[in-house]
């Protein structure tokens, strides 16, 4: 064979899927589901009976976990739905930049500077006020399907 070394430029991630399949009939309230390519938290599930020749159908009402929009979907209960991998990670808040980006401290001591302040007015005010008062704040970042957003705040005491 040849003695040449092959160099591959890899711009892909590890190949971990952003979603996994789950049978529609097994998805419950407070679970997660993908509706119209958006990760949603299920707030309501209703199942209709089978028709003469048909499948039982599941009617899902979900709220987008990033923008809060209400989305609906109807799926035969025997079919598979996509369920997003949703993770929550806590980071310590270091700084708030003028342009609305935050500096966060990761567990291994690195900084994460690619997150914006949340759009939720109440949470935004809590973060800004707490930071201005010099409190030690820990923010919870929810990530799913390649998106990340600050979703909660904890005060761990004064600096």
Image: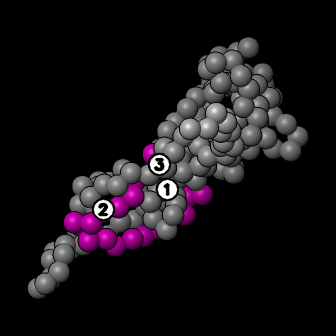
Q: Main secondary structure of the magenta part?
A: strand
Where 103 sits versus 50, above or below? above
Q: Position of residue 107 (x, y in %)?
A: 61, 20
The span picked out in magenta is: 67-85
Disc marking residue 80: 2
The residue shown at (52%, 60%) is 38
Local packing at callout 1 (Cα closer than 10 Å; few below 14, some 14-19, many 20+) is: many
Calculate the distance from the C-alpha at mark 1 to the C-alpha at mark 3. Answer: 14 Å
Local packing at callout 2 (Cα closer than 10 Å; few below 14, some 14-19, many 20+) is: some
Q: Nearer the viewer, mark 2 or mark 3?
A: 3
In the rendered structure, which disc, 2 or 3, sits on the residue that comes first in sequence? Answer: 3
Q: Nearer the viewer, mark 2 or mark 1?
A: 2
Residue beneath disc 1: 39
Q: Is residue 134 left or right of residue 27?
A: right
Q: Position of residue 116 (x, y in %)?
A: 74, 44
Count of numbered circles on the image? 3
Residue beneath disc 3: 17
């Amino acid at each position: 064979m040849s003695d040449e070394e092959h160099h591959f430029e890899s711009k892909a991630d590890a190949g971990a899927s952003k979603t996994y399949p789950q049978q529609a009939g097994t998805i419950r309230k407070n679970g997660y589901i993908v509706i119209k390519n958006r990760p949603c938290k299920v707030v309501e599930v209703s199942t209709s009976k089978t028709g003469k020749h048909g499948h039982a159908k599941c009617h899902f009402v979900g709220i987008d976990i990033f923008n809060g929009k209400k989305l609906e979907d109807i799926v035969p209960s025997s079919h598979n739905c996509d369920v997003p991998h949703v993770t929550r990670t806590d980071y310590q808040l270091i700084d708030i930049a003028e342009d609305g980006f935050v500096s966060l401290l990761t567990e291994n001591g690195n900084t994460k500077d690619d997150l914006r302040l949340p759009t939720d007015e109440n949470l935004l005010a809590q973060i800004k006020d707490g930071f201005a008062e010099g409190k030690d704040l820990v923010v919870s970042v929810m990530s799913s399907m390649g998106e990340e957003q600050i979703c909660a705040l904890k005060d761990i005491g004064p600096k």
